[in-house]
Image: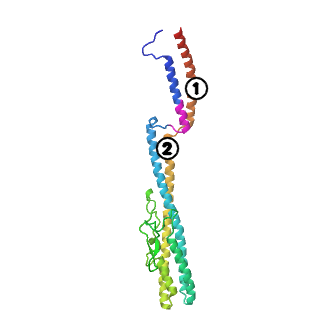
């Protein structure tokens, strides 16, 4: 018996082929179990690069979505508060018109003053409302402290500063809750000043001075009410914008997920078909290997 140089032993060739088929079967089984075409970059460098890019995009979109959700939650709370504030100022206007009636007695005006003081307290509580994280909604950048506080003279002053947190991390500006000074007006002519002027009018005993005080109070209350309504419209517009941005983020994440599936995803039907074909091939190879190995052994023994 002799061998030619460069010609491989048939047994070795058959064994190598079976090993290659077994390796492919093992990889396919792993891919089917994971639902992915590859787990190592070396298996598909281009696909891995595409998958990594899409994963980074999705992470950024998740961050944007969280910023939008936080801003939306704050604006929703602000919208409810502003609606309550408008109702409080509307009631204050009604009481001012009623108190301006010259037929009312001093005791009647005293009764009205009790309700007006209650409105003032409610408006102050509203101005210092907090969000779910305990931050003051209308305090702006200093949302760790109350937006409004009484000074030594008992006047309510804005204690916040600048604009509050919005959705800037998501690249969206103008979606922050308006600060208290924008909502309630200047300290000396805003909503709190209007109510204080109304209380002064209710306590004034001189008819001419009382009439002037009520005129001032009504004018300031109308301005304050309109300011609240304008702010409410602005909050509604910001919420609509955030809703659109949230839809954009959701759509972009869906597209990223589809791209990731395309980059790493596995055609399950094709993979299973290939797996079955390889199993048949392996079975046939094992049969052939058995015959070849048997013949080789017979040759050596002969």
Asked if residue 19 is positioned above or below residue 101 in the image, the reply reads above
Q: Residue at x 49, y 59 (%)?
A: 70
Residue 133 in the image, given as x and y percentages of width and height: 51, 62
The residue positioned farthest toward the left in the image shown: 162
The residue positioned farthest toward the front in the image shown: 152
**Circle 2 — which element?**
helix
Residue 27 in the image, given as x and y percentages of width and height: 52, 32
Q: How is the image coloured?
A: rainbow
| Disc with the residue nearer the chain's start (2 vs 1) | 2
Residue 18 appearing in the image: yes
Which residue is identified by label 2? 260
Q: Residue at x 53, y 64 (%)?
A: 76
Cα gap from disc 2 to disc 1, whole angstroms: 32 Å
What secondary structure prevails in the magenta region? Answer: helix
At label 1, counting other C-alpha atoms closer than 10 Å, the crowd grade (few under 14, some 14-19, many 20 or more) is few
| Quadrant of res 161 | bottom left
Residue 230 in the image, given as x and y percentages of width and height: 48, 71
Residue 214 appearing in the image: no
Q: Nearer the viewer, residue 285 or 296?
A: 296
Which residue is identified by label 1? 280
Residue 186 lies left or right of residue 88; in this view the side is: left
Q: Residue at x 51, y 45 (%)?
A: 258
Q: Nearer the viewer, residue 250 or 66?
A: 66
Q: Residue at x 58, y 20 (%)?
A: 287
Asked if residue 254 is positioned above or below residue 290 in the image, the reply reads below
Magenta-tinted stretch: 25-37
Q: Nearer the viewer, residue 190 or 118?
A: 118
Residue 31 magenta: yes
């Amino acid at each position: 018996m002799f061998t030619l140089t460069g010609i491989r032993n048939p047994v070795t060739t058959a064994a190598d082929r079976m090993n290659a088929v077994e390796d492919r079967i093992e990889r396919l089984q792993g891919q089917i179990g994971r639902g992915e075409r590859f787990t190592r970059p070396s298996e598909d460098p281009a696909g891995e690069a595409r998958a990594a890019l899409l994963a980074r995009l999705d992470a950024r979109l998740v961050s944007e979505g969280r910023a939008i959700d936080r801003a939306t939650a704050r604006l929703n709370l602000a919208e409810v508060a502003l609606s309550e504030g408008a109702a409080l100022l509307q009631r204050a206007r009604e009481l001012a018109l009623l108190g301006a009636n010259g037929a009312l007695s001093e005791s009647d005006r005293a009764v009205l003053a009790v309700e007006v003081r209650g409105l003032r307290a409610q408006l102050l509580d509203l101005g210092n409302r907090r969000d779910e994280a305990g931050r003051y909604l209308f305090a702006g950048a200093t949302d760790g402290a109350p937006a409004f506080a009484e000074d030594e003279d008992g006047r309510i002053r804005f204690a916040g500063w600048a604009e509050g947190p919005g959705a800037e991390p998501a690249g969206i500006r103008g979606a922050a809750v308006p600060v208290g000074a924008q909502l309630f007006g200047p300290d000396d002519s805003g909503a709190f000043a209007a109510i204080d002027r109304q209380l002064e009018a209710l306590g004034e005993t001189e008819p001419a001075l009382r009439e002037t005080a009520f005129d001032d109070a009504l004018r300031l209350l109308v301005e304050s009410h309109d300011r609240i309504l304008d702010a409410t419209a602005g909050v509604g517009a910001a919420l609509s914008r955030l809703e659109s941005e949230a839809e954009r983020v959701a759509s972009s994440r869906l597209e990223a997920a589809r791209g990731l599936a395309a980059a790493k995803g596995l055609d399950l039907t094709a993979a299973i078909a290939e797996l079955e074909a390889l199993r048949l091939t392996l079975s046939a190879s094992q049969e052939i290997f058995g015959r070849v190995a048997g013949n080789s052994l017979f040759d050596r023994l002969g």
